[in-house]
Image: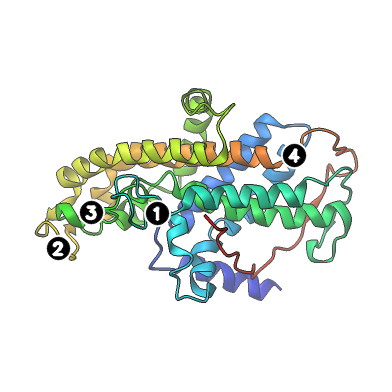
Amino acid sequence: MKARLVLCWLMASCAGAAHAWGPLGHRTVAETAALLVQDDLPATWGPLLARHRFALGVYAFVPDFRFRHIDGHGGKLEAPTHYLYLDAAEGTDRGSVDRRIAQFVERARTQLGPVRAPSGGYLAGAEATGDARRIYLGLIELGVMAHYSGDAAVPYHATADTNGYARGEGGIHFYFENECVDVFEPGLATDVLETARARRAEWLSRWNAAKASPQELALAVLKESLATVPSVSEIDRRDAVVKLEPSGSKGNASRKPAPSGCRALRPIVVLRLAQGAVLTAVLWERALPTRGVDFQKARELSFSDMEPAPAFVPPSAP
């Protein structure tokens, strides 16, 4: 089991063709969300999710390192579930990340809804029964969902110019989401949590979170992601790009190494990761039964294992 988990994590860490936040970004979104839920639900689900935030962070990268490779269609079935191009022409394949988010919220709710009196200490989830087993499986659904809610906070997942080619800025997508994120850690996750806690109430009010459906919440974040694209582009051109490509070219622009070229993008990276975490936390809380659950015998419930190879979940019908 340990060997398979190590292999699983290495696959995530070495995936060079990631199409959104890399493993570090998705982990940051999920782990931050778990701590936000702990803030909100300190006597029930919060501590349990916080204890399992590493596992949630690993599951949050499953759609990239696993689903894309096992969807039976060379990744083409899974790929559109990671984005929604708000500026694309009507009638084109704009993507479906908002529906994917709603799908996994419902899957988590179905798994966790029956939980009433979990119990146990340090145990193997693969061998667990009853409510403990439901929680073990529910953590997988919550973690995978965090991938898509994290994607909604990525600027270039909301625009049809997904990698900046139209402006000669090819490669900006991966530079912003992978190289910049990697160079900002350690220290990035701390700033993301601080920003999420400081601005969560403001954002939830702006998104009308109390009344919005999961899809509507995702759309609210996607709109803010799209609105961020011009700022990312301006900073990229000013501080990172050494040589642009012709507009419309599929070549990548030449950029400075991340330690120098990414410096001015840091506030935007922190903000987008923090919004992804806040979105994830509020969606997780939609899936958690908060009434009628007795945690008295589950205060030390902690799983010693993770599911190393989750099965592909086909997208729900439109």
- Compare marks 1 and 2 and give the one earlier in the sequence: 1
Q: How is the image coloured?
A: rainbow
> Badge 1 is on which residue?
182
x and y percent of residue 299 in the render? 83, 42
Q: Determine the residue positioned at 32% across, 57% down.
A: 174
- Compare marks 4 and 1 and give the one earlier in the sequence: 4
Q: Do the residues labelled 1 and 3 touch (CB within 8 Å)?
A: no
- Compare marks 2 and 3 and give the one earlier in the sequence: 3
The kind of residue on which mark 1 rests is Asp
> Badge 2 is on which residue?
249
The answer, for residue 124, to whether it is visible in the render is yes
The kind of residue on which mark 2 rests is Ser
Q: Neighbour class for label 2 at 10 Å: few (<14), some, many (≥20)? A: some
Q: Determine the residue positioned at 71% across, 38% down.
A: 46
Numbered tag placed on residue 45 in the rendering:
4
Q: Determine the residue positioned at 47% across, 67% down.
A: 77
Q: Distance between the residues labelled 4 and 1?
A: 30 Å
> Badge 3 is on which residue?
164
- Residue 155's quadrant in the figure? top left
Q: Distance between the residues labelled 1 and 2?
A: 27 Å
Give the answer, above or below, for where 28 lies relative to 61.
Answer: above
Give the answer, above or below, for where 103 lies relative to 71.
Answer: above
Q: Is residue 300 left or right of residue 33?
A: right
The kind of residue on which mark 3 rests is Gly
Q: Nearer the viewer, residue 112 or 93?
A: 93
x and y percent of residue 21 in the render? 42, 54
x and y percent of residue 178 in the render? 37, 56
Q: Is residue 167 left or right of residue 44?
A: left
Q: Neighbour class for label 3 at 10 Å: few (<14), some, many (≥20)? A: many
